[in-house]
């Protein structure tokens, strides 16, 4: 199963082959070494003034952390995400040490998770980030203090074979064509919404 | 010049070798093909419900867009960033189509910029993201509408040789050791601030 993007210019395979599956192999166990590499990839991301606002709660299938993160998911995410080898809650520190807001906390945390995702592909794994979860459940389960906001739950693991997926809805979703807004509506020069005209 | 991170587990070279230089080669011209690949890498990032909140204003050294983005920078950024081949303002749509706030707009835009940065390294280039700019200047220069927030300015280009840097402050900064918060203060399991104990 592969869903490489049809890009208008060549992109590194670790990016071009990235997509967000819902079909994880329920028997695949991630090694300690793989997990350590994934976390290191996130840890070394850039951040404004090197503040590193990110924190991660990491569960491996079968442990209590995993169960609590899974329990915070909603809707269809609950159906498929429990096959992932790892579930990670990405949390950001919304304030600086002096209590003032960190304007780039969420942005910086996105930088870190993107690096984790690239490393996942380098390990032959896939990642699927979810916004569909109840932050209050995570906060309650893990005593996340005020000022820290869960931004995403990330499912990580190895792909299952699509034709072995148990659920019709899941099979249909896994074969949807990937799509993005056109270049001319994304990259501007001179003034807002004036296409850069490249690519 | 290289500042690979001393990671506690192996990380893909495109990530391990990423750092944020201030020493860009002022004569290096990025090709159309390189730029197209960088932008495609950003465009194919993941985002919540595939909303793709990111927009980018892209200037190439010598053009009016570049000058206006550079003019929005503050402090020391103004000194060094003008040698970059490209300056990009990363802007996010803070609201959804129905006018409600998009809680992951900044996070998703971080995902896109991280992919752009990975692609830059795949092209043999470097990137340096800056929070030190005046958003109002960008908004005024480019008629950025209300509801869109500039999050970062990204300098992209080829590294200059460190020993040819004109400025003592710049030379000192380029040789600082990279550092990150320890693993045990970043990755938790079970409860908040309980170290995952891996890596």
Image: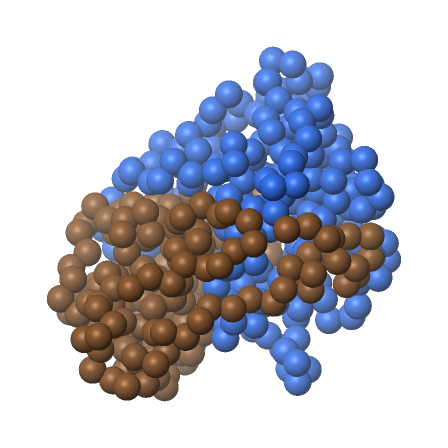
Chain colours: A blue, B brown
Residue A117 located left or right of residue A68: left
Residue A135 located left or right of residue B67: right
Callout count: 0
Q: Residue at x 82, y 52 (%)?
A: B190
Which residue is farthest top? A163
Height in image: A130 above or below A82? below
Height in image: A167 above or below B136? above
Q: Using the rendered view, name the quadrant where residue B167 is placed.
A: bottom left
Residue B192 located left or right of residue A191: right
Q: Residue at x 66, y 85 (%)?
A: A98
- State the residue in front, A19 or A31: A31
Q: Using the rendered view, name the quadrant where residue B174 is placed.
A: bottom left
- State the residue in front, B42 or B184: B184
Q: Residue at x 54, y 63 (%)?
A: A108
Q: Quadrant of the N terminus of chain B?
A: bottom left
Height in image: B65 above or below B32? below
Measuring from the top left, give residue A155's x and y in whole percent: 66, 39
Q: Is residue B100 visible?
A: no
Measuring from the top left, give residue A138's x and y in whole percent: 80, 54
Q: Residue at x 34, y 81 (%)?
A: B172
Measuring from the top left, give residue B181's x and y in whole percent: 60, 67
Measuring from the top left, give residue B140's x and y in whole percent: 35, 77
Height in image: B146 above or below A85? below
Q: Using the rendered view, name the quadrant where residue A10 is placed.
A: top left
Q: Is residue B129 visible?
A: yes
């Amino acid at each position: 199963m592969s869903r490489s993007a049809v890009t208008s210019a060549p992109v590194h395979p670790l990016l071009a082959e990235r997509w967000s599956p819902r079909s994880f192999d329920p028997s695949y166990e991630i090694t300690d070494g793989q997990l350590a590499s994934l976390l290191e990839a996130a840890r070394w991301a850039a951040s404004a003034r090197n503040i590193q606002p990110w924190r991660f709660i990491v569960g491996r299938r079968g442990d209590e952390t995993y169960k609590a993160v899974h329990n915070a998911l909603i809707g269809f995410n609950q159906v498929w995400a429990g096959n992932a080898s790892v579930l990670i809650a990405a949390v950001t520190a919304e304030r600086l040490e002096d209590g003032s807001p960190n304007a780039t906390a969420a942005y910086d945390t996105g930088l870190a998770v993107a690096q984790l995702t690239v490393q996942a592909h380098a390990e032959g794994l896939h990642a699927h980030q979810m916004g569909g979860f109840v932050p209050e459940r995570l906060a309650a389960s893990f005593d996340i203090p005020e000022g820290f906001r869960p931004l995403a739950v990330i499912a990580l693991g190895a792909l299952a074979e699509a034709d072995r997926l148990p659920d019709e809805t899941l099979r249909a979703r896994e074969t949807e064509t990937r799509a993005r807004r056109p270049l001319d509506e994304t990259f501007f020069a001179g003034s807002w919404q004036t296409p850069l005209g490249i690519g």
